[in-house]
Amino acid sequence: MQIPTVAITGVPDPLPEGLVVLDVREPVEWQAGHIEGAMHIPLAEVAERSAEVPTDTQVLVVCKIGGRSARATAFLAQSGVDVVNLDGGMLEWEAAGRPMVSETGASPQVV
């Protein structure tokens, strides 16, 4: 199965209205820095929580470098969700200077 993938240069800035971002990293990674407004479902919980993922709009799936999000993208695509994996993940997002927020009170960062 071909996993739908997009490079950071193919992701509009700012993100278009209605695009859902799904972050599948672990809680400590999420707390350190994530895309504002993103949904957080760790990869290990994606199958059991897949009903939480919208099916009426495109979903951009992210992790740190793109491996975990590729697995989530493949699973969700087989479930009929319009999904695309961010190649290079949050490391590419951060390197491109895209905005992030943190839950820790410190400056957001990718860990």
Image: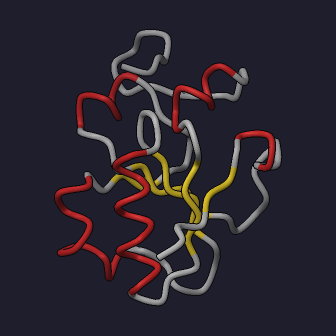
- Tell me the colour scheme of the image: secondary structure
- 66 displayed left or right of 103: right
Q: Residue furthest top?
A: 106
Residue displayed at 63% across by 73% down: 58
Q: Residue furthest front?
A: 1
Q: How many marks?
A: 0
Residue displayed at 50% across by 50% down: 38
- 43 displayed left or right of 3: left
Residue displayed at 76% across by 63% down: 17
Residue 20 appears at what percent x and percent y?
A: 58, 63
Residue displayed at 70% across by 28% down: 98
Please tell me whether residue 1 is drawn above or below residue 60 in the rendered image.
Answer: below
Residue 30 appears at what percent x and percent y?
A: 35, 35
The residue nearer to you, when weighing 21 against 6, is 6
Residue 95 appears at what percent x and percent y?
A: 65, 19
Please tell me whether residue 80 is drawn above or below residue 60 in the rendered image.
Answer: below
Q: Quadrant of the C terminus?
A: top left
- 56 displayed left or right of 41: right
Please tell me whether residue 15 is drawn above or below residue 84 in the rendered image.
Answer: above
The residue nearer to you, when weighing 5 against 50, is 5
Residue 49 appears at what percent x and percent y?
A: 24, 73
Please tell me whether residue 88 is drawn above or below residue 101 in the rendered image.
Answer: below
